[in-house]
Amino acid sequence: MSPLIVANWKMNPPRLDDALKLYKSIATLSRSLKNIETVVCPPSPFIEPLMRSLRSSPVVLGGQNIHSESSGAFTGEVSGSMLYTAGARFVIVGHSERRAMGEDDELVSRKVLAAYKARLTPIVCVGESVRDSSGDYLHIVARQLEASVQYITGAQLAKTVIAYEPVWAIGDTAKKAAEPRDVEEMTLYIRRILADRIGPNKAARVRILYGGSVNAQNALDFLGDTRADGLLVGRASVTAQFLTMLKAVNAA
Ligand code: PGA
């Protein structure tokens, strides 16, 4: 499995011009990188212009959020089929910044199902808010994961991307990224939970990403045999660092 690197641009950059420049630089570089897969998740209004800006691109586009229903009176929301039509093939679901706005596991699980109905591959985010010495974070992540994928079939789960994003390691307020050994523990643990539901062979092929303060310096620390199968990158994904990171992961 080649590493999957997902750029979560969040609500950046402010201008379409800059988004186009950034996307083109990633796509141009990616043409020569054969050992990785790259997904860029821009703000929704930018998905279609980015898709149309290049005749073909090795970079796949994704949404950052999806509504659980396919249409209706949901002011301000975007459906899976709208994302798909705009050019997205992936969608981030249950990001901690969305969970902080009130999304619970039940809603996340309906969004995961909505993603499959729209032919999008969900990238389901899970992660504990704090770490305590009693090891409770393992159970928190287990419960979150099981509940978040409760409505999809085993075959769908086998194709789902899971992103382990400890909330304490995400964003400007984070003091640091997780330690590689923490990520290793969690990816093994998540795979065991998946194996309970879909068996060890299928679980072995599910991509589990790490996200939280990933940058060009630490990216490689999280990848490797027993660690994550890819990265979900926030802040660093809208800077030139992202290109350095892609090159490094491709060459590793
Ligand atoms: P960060 O964000 O890389 O800026 O910590 C990661 C994420 O929110 O997905």
Image: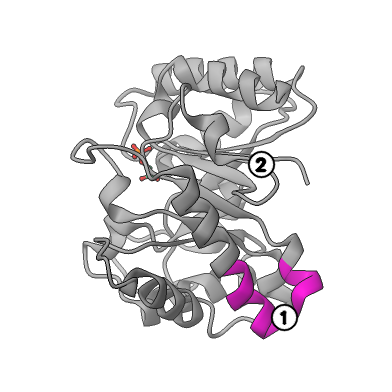
The answer to whether the beta carbon of the residue marked 2 is less than 8 Å from any atom of ligand 1 is no
Q: Is residue 137 left or right of residue 183?
A: left
Asked if residue 48 lies in the magenta stretch, the reply is no
- How many numbered marks, from 0 up? 2
Which amino acid lies under the numbered mark 2 shown in the image of this protein?
Gly
**In the displayed structure, would residue 5 be above or below residue 218?**
below
Please report the residue visible at 28 percent of the width from the left and 73 percent of the height from the top: 134
Q: Position of residue 32 (x, y in %)?
A: 77, 17
Residue stretch in magenta: 190-203
Residue 123 in view (yes/no): no
Q: Which mark is residue 224?
A: 2
Please report the residue visible at 46 percent of the width from the left and 76 percent of the height from the top: 142
Please report the residue visible at 21 percent of the width from the left and 62 percent of the height from the top: 101
Under circle 2, the secondary element is: loop
**In the displayed structure, would residue 28 be above or below residue 198?**
above
Query: In which image quadrant can residue 135 be found?
Result: bottom left
